[in-house]
Amino acid sequence: MNEQEQKAIMTLVLMAAFADDRNEPNERAEVNRVAESLSKDSAVNVAGIYQDVLLKRATLEDAAAALTTPDVKRLAYELCVGVCDANGAQGSAERAFLERLQKALGFDAGAAATAGTFSSSADALAAAPLAVVSAAEPA
């Protein structure tokens, strides 16, 4: 993955975090995790990307167009789903963002169905209650 693709993915991840107009700690933590992973071996300027997203100088369509391979497109989509699900199940604004992202990435019907299944599975997992540990079980 080249630096342009890393920048595009980070742009999309930040857009996913802002899709519901809320600034939640779990989403910020997930964005930070992605940023650390992407910038580990490159000079991606996360602060500059953050400004571009907040000031609306970056568009979803431009960021998606910078992703050229199916694997990188899928990675970007799945990272965005992870950010949208970081604070629980997706809201309507987040689902709308992910649908728009699917179209911008050019997912055909099969890829869109796979992406939708992934998103639904991730959403169900995010909404699932945590396991309860009984007093008889070690922590």
Image: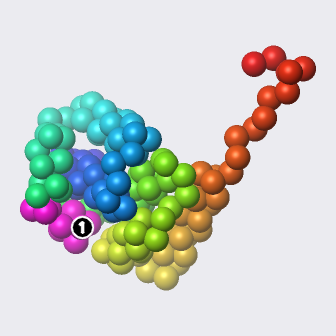
Q: Quadrant of residue 65?
A: bottom left
**Residue type at tag 1:** Leu
Looking at the image, which residue is at 44% across and 80% down? 108
In this picture, residue 19 sits left or right of residue 126: left
Percent position of residue 120, x then y? 59, 65
Instruction: Give the camera-side residue of 72 and 23.
Output: 23
98 lies above or below 36: below
Looking at the image, which residue is at 39% across and 45% down? 24
The reply to whether the magenta stretch includes residue 110 is: no
> Which residues, given as a range, are shown in magenta?
56-64
Instruction: Give the camera-side residue of 23 and 83.
Output: 23
Percent position of residue 38, x then y? 29, 39
Q: Quadrant of residue 66?
A: bottom left
Q: Disc 1 marks which residue? A: 60
Q: Residue furthest bottom?
A: 109
Percent position of residue 92, x then y? 46, 71
In this picture, residue 12 sits left or right of residue 62: right
Looking at the image, which residue is at 75% across and 38% down? 131
Residue 133 visible (yes or no): yes
